[in-house]
Each structure stands twice: as C-alpha cells, then as structure tokens.
C-alpha cells in the first residue's frame, strides 16, 4: 500500500477504534447501572459473630460485591477486617490462629511480674484488688482491660504497619458503639479503625470501656445490634444483606439456674428490642435476611470459631436463590475486588518513639523499657512483649500503641493508662485446710497498699490476718534509683499461732507461740528474674504451753535475738501455683546472736503435651545453735509430705525432695487463668533434730493422688496420701498459702 493510501485509511481506522472503545465503555457503564447496590450488615453476638466469616465466604463464591458495610460488636470486628480488604479465608485463619484463652486474660506471664508484685500475688488474691479514694472503695470497671484484644485487632487490620482510619478504607464502613455515660448511640464513619473496633466489642462489665474523643464507649449492641440504618444512609443500597447472630432469650429454667442469668437475660431483652426495630427497616421482598442456626454455641465460645464459620456458610447457602441475583461476572467481580483490596504493607521504619505519660519520670522509665529503636523496622512481637512487661509493674490498667504518619515520618506512640482506681489499694486473701487427723484451719488476710507515695515509687503496705495464725505487719518499700532496681525494705510485725505437738501421729499438746520482729534491708532487683537483700533483724519469740504435757524438746522461754541476714529469691515459673514450665531458686542465711538459720529451695517444672512434671528440693538447718520453736522447720501438709498432718514434724535440720506428675484434665473457663489436674506425688523427707514425733527417726516417705488446680481464690488440692508409719490421710487445701 502506498504512503498516500495509508494516510487515507488511518483516519478511518482511528475513528473505528474510538467507536469500539466508546461502545465498550457504554456497555460497562450500562452493566454498572444494572448492578444492584449492596449494603452488608453484620450484627453483634460475641463469639457467635464468627458466623459472619462463613456468610462472607459464600458471598465471595457467588461473586457478590459490597458497596458499604456496618457492624456491631463481633460483627464490627469482621466488618472492620473486611473493609481493609481481608478475604474470608484470611479472617478464618486469623480466628483459628488466635490464642483466645490468653487474649481474654490481661495478666502478663507470671515470670514477667516484678519481684515486688510476685510477692503481692503470693500473699493476696490477684482479683481482689480494689482502689480506695476519699474513704470509698473503687473497683475496676470490668473484669478485663482488653489490651490483648486490642493487640489482636491491631495485627488483624495492620494497624501495626500503618495508621488505619475508617474514612480511608476503600469500602465505606460504619461501626456502632454506645456512650455509656449518656446512653447515646454513636456511629463511627471516621476515626481510628482499631480503637473503634475495640470499643464496639466492649461488653459492659466484662471488657473495659474505651475512652475516645471525649466519650466512654462500650458495646454497640446495647443500642443497635443489627445496624441496618447505617448502610441505608451511607450508600443507599438497592439490597440490604443483614446477618443476625444475636443470642436467643433464655428459657425459664435457664433463668432460674443462676443469679447471673437474670443479668444476662436483661441484656438480651435490651438487645432484642433494638434488633426488632432495625429489622422493621428491611424490605422482605428484596432484602436478604440471614439468621444462622447457632444452637449450642454461646457468646463465649470463641474457641469454636471454625464450627461457627461453617454454620454461617450453611445459612448463606440456604439464601443462595436470593443472593444469586446479585452476582457479577468473574471479570466484573475481579475488578471490584481490586478496587477495595489494600496492598500488603511492609513493617514501617520507626523514626521516633514517643511515650504519652503525664509523669516525666515514668515516661523516661517506660521509654527505657521499649526496645524499639529509631530508624529500624517495627518489631511488633517485641513491642507487645515490652508493653506486657511494663504492664507487669502493676501501675497500669492498659498499655496500647498507635502509629502516626506525618510528612513520610512514622512515630510510634505508646499510650499507657494508669489504673483509675489507684494508686491506693485494698487487697484480700484467705485459705482453708482440713485433714482427717487434724482440725480444720482457716485464715482471712487483708491488706492496704499505698503506692506512688513519692516520685521514685515508694510504697507503704499494712497487712493483717485473723484465724489460726494472727498477724499484723507494716512494710515500707522505697526504691532508691529512678529505674527502681535499688531499694530499701523496712518491716515491723507481730504474729501468734497455736502449734500442735504430735507424738505417734496424734496431737499430744498445744503451744501458744508469738513473734515480734523488726527488719531493715537494702535490696537489688535483677529485672524480672529475682531479688537479693542484705539486712539487719531484731526478733523476740515466745512459746508457752497451752494444752497437754510439756513434751516439746526445745526451750519455751522468751529469747530476744538480733542479727543480720542475706537472701536471694529468683522465680521464673510461668504461673503462680501450677506452672507448666520454669524454675525457682531461693536461699537465705540469718545470723542471730544465739543461733543461725540456712534455708534453700529449688523447684523446676516441665511439660510434655498434657503432662506436667514438677520437682522440688529443700533444706533448712542451723549451722550455729538450735532453731527456736517460732523459727523452726516443719514437715507435713500439701507438697511438704502430704501424708503427714500440717506441721506434724517440727524441728531442725530439714531435708526434703519431691516429684509431682500431673495430667491436665481441663482448662478453666475463658477469661480465668488455670486448669484442673489429676496428680501423683512421691516425697521423701527427714528432720535430723526433732521437737515433735521424737520416737521416730530417719527418712519419711509419702505418696499421694490428688485433684488440683489454680482457682480464682488460689490453689486447690483434694487428695489422699499415705506416709511412713502413719494411717492414710484425706486432705483439702484451698486459698492463698
């Protein structure tokens, strides 16, 4: 073809191409015009909300686009994740991988508590903490602070990689919360995504409210559990797909089974009323209403999330005939998916670390505890561990973080919240023990702790105990340096108790003993590993016969003694009473004017699947003189030759070894740390110098079978045991030792 002909043909070809492109564009717009606009509504229901993921899976299979989405509570969690472009498969995997038991327990690993707080936890029930302000008791607003839930949400929506705002999501989103102060329904179509997702999940009384932009927010289910109004206002959809996973009303027999059931039913009634109002907004001829069959799945069954997802999918399957009308072609759906999907983000480079803390010294201390360095990628795992480590100080109710971007610079902002009910606390502890060869024993313990007395964190603790052992102690704990490593520890106390003296397995006499003691020590905290002390002590013990014959083989007169001591206590067990791994090492030496005392204890725990092995070695003796009754060693009781009665063998120069093998039978309910175990123990012990059971000598062997577990009030042991030259003993112990 000649150049001239080409020039003549080219304009015609160009015109034809433009015409074809115009026709294609018009057809595409025509398809868009024909496509019905869809609004998706995901209701609240706690763990039952995992069913939403199954519904979304079906929508994906049918290639149904969503133009806007709203959610409440667990529905808000799924809606928020979906708005960021997550697929149903990704959400399902995230729910399956989550450690729900750990998430619903704010307490850091016991090993990460400060030595001071470990001591407090060993003495008092951790959940008994209440604040005292202006002479009134103040309690936490909820069982859980919810910080681990927030960590999970941050990771779910990648708020740990970049700031995530609701208004910046490619899919229009609205989340519902309740202002617990005013009772108002608050719909969030903008704001910090992870924070609002956490707020809409704040079940009153269970998970602490979220303070955000001047409001105190809780679960939106109280005011709008199926927020249909939101999608109608946001994108004016032609079709609304509403998914209701709310808990049904309790039956009469269920309400009568527990006082808490009445409270649960009250919440259900409030929710049911607003759901009825919302459902009235649906056009049953055109809209799609899905209510999965979740019979047997409660709002707390988070660990059954995969089963719940399948039930949601099955419910959407039943609505397939209605849903199919909304399907797109594969090409159209891929285009929509590409529009709403966010690209994977790398971990950001942190340019600055900022701690928002009113107290300048506390801000410095927290900054030192955060290992994240400027100009390095964010290490989310390390950051969460650092925040939980700081939480172990015991001064904060919540530790959170945010990423802020400004002119291509990323700031990591740490957001600690001090306990609103602090800084002065009331605490309580109790214990009860019983055995077939001794009378029942009990103790009730109360404490008043004043913290943050000065800028270095001084504390004053008043402790009192009534029962078989009466005690009153005042303790002053004063950190010396800003990092709270060096400290002084001053105590003054008095205690008295009755001590039974056994011969041939029977209590033959009883002594009244008391001890007045004052001590002052200089100590050093080895981070969370342990503590060492060096101090002086003044003691005045006394023992006198109460009932029976003068059979005790030691002096019963008052003996005032003074001297010095050194002690070391290193505790790396992962749980307080029933660890599954870790070690513990304690040793002390007291040198008084007429006697000295050495004590040492070593424990270790290791687990293989559901079996836990725990070993213990202990020694107590007097290199100089002889231990007085008020400071004597004892054998007898749980984990101390359980086949003997409590303190059955009293004396000097104690040697002990024990091994426990336990099988974990079940876990405590979600939100409560601990488990129930069936255990076997074998123990051996010896008291070289005996003040009681003087007719026996040599090693005492003991074996036990027991049920045990960590309960909300402390460890529980129920078992039967047999020791050398003793009849079988049934025993019970519960409470804080």
Image: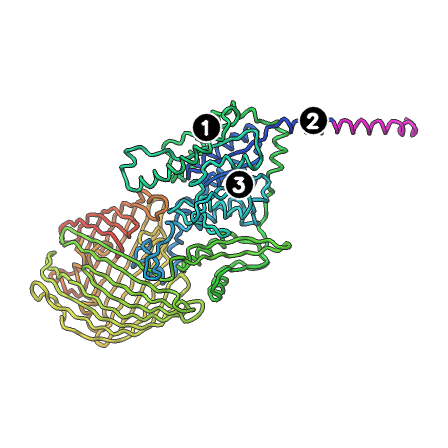
Residue 330 in view (yes/no)? yes
Q: Which mark is residue 336?
A: none
Category of crowding for the residue at label 2, using alpha-carbon neighbours closer than 10 angstroms: few (below 14), some (14–19), many (at least 20): few
For marks 1 and 3, give the CA distance.
24 Å
Residue at the extreme bottom: 593
Residue under numbered circle 1:
315
Residue at 69% x, 26% y is 27
- Judged from the image, the secondary structure of the residue bearing numbered disc 3 is strand
* Of pointers 1 and 2, the one earlier in the residue sequence: 2
Check if residue 544 falls in the magenta segment.
no
Q: Position of residue 18 (x, y in %)?
A: 78, 29
Q: Position of residue 202 (x, y in %)?
A: 43, 46
Taking 123 as reference, is 7 left or right?
Answer: right
| Residue at x 21%, y 67% (from the top left corner) | 631
* 8 up-or-down from 554: above or below: above
Which of disc 3 and disc 1 is earlier in sequence?
A: 3
Mark 2 near mark 3, Cβ–Cβ under 8 Å?
Answer: no
- Is 15 drawn above or below residue 171 in the view shown? above
Residue at label 2? 27
Tell me the colour scheme of the image. Answer: rainbow
Viewer can see residue 93: no
Tag nearer the camera, 1 or 2: 2
Mark 1 nearby-residue class (10 Å; few <14, some 14–19, many ≥20): many
Q: Magenta stretch?
A: 1-22
Q: CA distance from mark 1 to mark 2?
A: 35 Å
């Amino acid at each position: 073809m000649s150049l001239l002909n080409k020039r003549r043909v080219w304009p015609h070809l160009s015109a034809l191409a433009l015409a074809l492109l115009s026709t294609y564009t018009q057809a595409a717009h025509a398809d868009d015009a024909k496509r019905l606009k869809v609004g998706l509504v995901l209701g609240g229901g706690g763990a039952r909300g995992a069913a939403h993921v199954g519904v979304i899976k079906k929508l994906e299979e049918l290639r149904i686009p969503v133009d806007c989405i709203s959610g409440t509570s667990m529905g808000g969690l799924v809606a928020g994740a979906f708005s960021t472009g997550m697929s149903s498969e990704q959400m399902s995997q995230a729910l399956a991988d989550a450690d729900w038991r750990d998430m619903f327990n704010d307490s850091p690993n016991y090993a990460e508590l400060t030595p001071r707080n470990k001591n407090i936890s060993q003495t008092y029930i951790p959940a008994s903490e209440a604040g005292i302000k202006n002479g009134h008791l103040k309690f936490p607003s909820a069982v859980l602070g919810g910080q681990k839930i927030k960590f999970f949400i941050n990771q779910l929506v990648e708020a740990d990689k970049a700031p995530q705002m609701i208004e910046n999501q490619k899919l229009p989103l609205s989340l519902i919360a309740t202002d617990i102060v005013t009772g108002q329904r608050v719909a969030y179509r903008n704001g910090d995504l992870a924070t609002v997702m956490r707020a809409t999940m704040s079940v009153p009384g269970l998970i602490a409210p979220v303070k955000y932009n001047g409001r105190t927010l809780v679960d939106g289910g109280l005011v709008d559990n199926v927020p249909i109004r939101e999608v109608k206002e946001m994108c004016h959809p032609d079709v609304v797909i509403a998914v209701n996973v709310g808990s049904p009303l309790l039956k009469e027999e269920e309400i009568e089974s527990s006082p808490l059931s009445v409270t649960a039913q009250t919440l259900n009634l409030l929710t049911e009323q607003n759901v009825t109002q919302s459902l009235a907004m649906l056009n049953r001829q055109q809209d799609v209403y899905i209510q999965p069959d979740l019979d047997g799945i409660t709002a707390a069954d988070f660990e059954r999330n995969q089963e719940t997802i399948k039930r949601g999918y099955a419910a959407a399957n039943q609505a397939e005939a209605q849903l199919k009308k909304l399907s797109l072609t594969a090409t159209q759906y891929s285009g929509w998916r590409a529009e709403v999907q966010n690209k994977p983000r790398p971990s950001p480079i942190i340019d600055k670390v900022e701690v928002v803390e009113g107290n300048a010294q506390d801000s410095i201390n927290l900054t030192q505890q955060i290992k994240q360095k400027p100009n390095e990628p964010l290490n989310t795992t390390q950051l969460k561990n650092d925040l939980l480590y700081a939480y172990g100080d015991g001064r904060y109710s919540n530790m959170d973080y945010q990423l802020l971007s400004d002119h291509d610079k990323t700031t990591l902002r740490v957001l600690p919240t001090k306990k609103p009910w602090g800084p002065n606390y009331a605490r309580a502890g109790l214990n009860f023990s019983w055995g077939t060869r001794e009378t029942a024993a009990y103790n009730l313990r109360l404490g008043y702790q004043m913290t943050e007395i000065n800028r270095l964190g001084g504390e004053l603790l008043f402790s009192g105990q009534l029962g078989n052992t009466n005690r009153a102690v005042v303790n002053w704990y004063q950190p010396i340096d800003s990092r709270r490593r060096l400290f002084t520890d001053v105590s003054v106390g008095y205690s008295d108790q009755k001590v039974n003296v056994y011969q041939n397995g029977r209590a033959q006499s009883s002594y009244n003993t008391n001890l007045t003691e004052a001590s002052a020590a200089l100590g050093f905290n080895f981070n969370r590993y342990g503590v060492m002390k060096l101090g002086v002590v003044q003691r005045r013990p006394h023992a006198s016969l109460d009932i029976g014959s003068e059979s005790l083989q030691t002096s019963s007169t008052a003996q005032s003694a003074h001297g010095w001591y050194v002690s070391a206590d290193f505790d790396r067990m992962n749980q307080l009473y029933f660890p599954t791994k870790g070690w513990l090492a304690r040793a002390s030496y007291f040198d008084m004017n007429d006697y000295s005392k050495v004590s040492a204890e070593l424990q270790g725990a290791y687990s293989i699947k559901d079996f836990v092995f725990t070993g213990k070695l202990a020694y107590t003796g007097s290199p100089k003189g002889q231990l007085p009754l008020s400071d004597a060693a004892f054998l007898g009781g749980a984990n101390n030759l359980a086949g003997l009665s409590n303190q059955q063998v009293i004396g000097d120069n104690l040697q002990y070894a024990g091994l426990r093998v336990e099988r974990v039978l079940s876990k405590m309910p979600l939100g409560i740390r601990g488990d129930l175990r069936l255990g076997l123990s074998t123990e051996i012990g010896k008291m070289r110098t005996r003040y009681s059971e003087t007719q026996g000598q040599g090693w005492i062997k003991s074996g036990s079978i027991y049920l045990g577990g960590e309960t909300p009030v402390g460890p529980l042991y129920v078992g039967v045991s047999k020791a050398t030259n003793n009849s079988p003993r049934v025993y019970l112990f519960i409470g804080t030792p």
